Image (cartoon, rainbow, N blue to C red):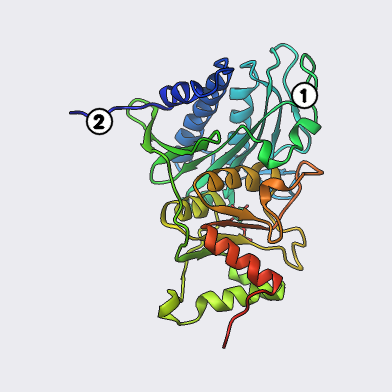
């Protein structure tokens, strides 16, 4: 009996049957995102062969040198999404302000924020990178262009979140609040096929992902946690394994599959942390929570934070529930390590 082939489109249509008010517009939007992902995947895999590696002469709103593939991914996402009639406004890590829908195109009821290519500093080294997206329903009046306020909603109001990881294979992972589903791109006929139904993250993992070069700049509770996880105590499965790719989508994706925790704390060098709330922390938090995990800024659930500006940064602790809870206990001083 051949295995049932479920494409992303078929899955979304079947999922939308759970939402009686679904109009099919969301299905179209997801298909537009999948199309952009296929284009970015094709060029990411070809990047070494065509003049799309390396840097442009541009510096983005983050103050970072824009990689050619960054720019390509950003332009592709905008072009794939701006004409479908599903969105009223967009926001991108690569654009300082919100991106209006061109007047010649119809407006829709959805809002999308995205990081077109997270981890792009790794591109030239052929390390996997990813696209992250976060979708809300508009809160501004219909019939007019969407607004900045539409893009500053708390994460718990997301209607969909997902990421695409361009690695040994290209995978699209998404949730609409009814579990997490992973699709692998079959390049032979350009379809995303369901490969990871109902993804669940282990309650406790054995991997911690952090850039320890920032150690001296962290608050004491984080330092204590890192000392703790490296201590030799087989009874509590320590030392934990250190795995850090430097591409958050890849680190979180691996931890989602195997269990573990990714940390990007605030520091004296990055007082608000580095990761962006709107298009990195919130979508990944929605996905990880839907898979049974947890995402915190150290004091508060990420999804409960109300953004006050578009490119707002946040400390991020995300992954297996027990690991994130333990980090919060070290930060509050409830826990410490014994020498
Ligand atoms: P650092 C990539 O720039 C990114 O936003 C995440 O994908 C990644 O985990 C982090 O920054 C890497 O930052 O300070 O470890 O180089």
Quarter holding residue 331: bottom right
Residue 83 seen in the figure? yes
The N terminus appears in which quarter of the rendering?
top left
Foreground pick, 337 / 211 = 337
Horizontal and vertical percent position of residue 49: 44, 40
Above or below 110: residue 312: below
Above or below 227: residue 128: above
Q: Which mark is residue 146?
A: 1
Above or below 53: residue 150: above
Name the residue located 59 percent from the left edge and 81 percent from the top edge. 337
Horizontal and vertical percent position of residue 181: 45, 37
Of helix, strand and loop, which one carries label 2? loop
Kindly give the residue lying farthest to the bottom in the view shown.
339
> Which of disc 1 and disc 2 is earlier in sequence?
2
Q: Nearer the viewer, mark 2 or mark 1?
A: 2
Query: Does the beta carbon of the residue at mark 2 sit less than 8 Å from ligand 1?
Result: no
Q: In this rendering, would 267 be left or right of 195?
A: right
Q: Which residue is mark 2?
A: 3
């Amino acid at each position: 009996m051949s295995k049932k082939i479920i494409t992303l489109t078929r899955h979304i249509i079947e999922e939308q049957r759970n939402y009686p008010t679904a109009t099919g517009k969301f299905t179209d939007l997801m298909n537009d995102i999948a199309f952009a992902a296929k284009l970015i995947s094709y060029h990411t895999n070809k990047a070494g062969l065509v003049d799309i590696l390396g840097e442009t002469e541009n510096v983005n709103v983050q103050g970072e040198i824009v990689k050619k593939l960054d720019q390509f991914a950003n332009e592709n996402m905008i072009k794939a999404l701006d004409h479908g009639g599903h969105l009223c406004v967009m926001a991108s890590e690569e654009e300082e302000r919100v991106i209006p829908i061109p007047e010649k195109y119809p407006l829709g009821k959805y809002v999308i924020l995205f990081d077109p290519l997270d981890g792009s500093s790794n591109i030239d080294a052929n390390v996997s990178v990813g696209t992250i997206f976060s979708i809300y329903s508009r809160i501004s009046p219909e019939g007019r262009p969407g607004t900045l306020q539409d893009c500053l909603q708390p994460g718990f109001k997301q209607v969909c979140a997902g990421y695409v990881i361009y690695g040994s294979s290209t995978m699209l992972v998404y949730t609409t609040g009814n579990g997490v589903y992973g699709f692998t791109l079959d390049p032979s006929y350009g379809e995303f096929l369901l490969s990871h139904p109902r993804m669940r993250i282990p309650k406790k993992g054995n991997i911690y992902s952090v850039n320890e070069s920032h150690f001296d700049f962290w608050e004491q509770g984080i330092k204590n946690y890192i000392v703790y996880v490296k201590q030799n105590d087989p009874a509590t499965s320590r030392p934990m394994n250190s795995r850090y790719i430097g591409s958050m989508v890849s680190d979180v994706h691996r931890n989602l599959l195997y269990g573990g925790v990714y940390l990007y704390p605030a520091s004296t060098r990055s007082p608000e942390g580095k990761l962006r709330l709107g298009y990195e922390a919130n979508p990944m938090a929605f996905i990880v929570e839907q898979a049974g995990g947890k995402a915190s800024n150290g004091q508060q659930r990420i999804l409960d934070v109300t953004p006050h500006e578009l490119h707002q940064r946040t400390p991020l602790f995300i992954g297996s529930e027990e690991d994130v809870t333990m980090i919060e206990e070290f930060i509050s001083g409830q826990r410490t390590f014994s020498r």
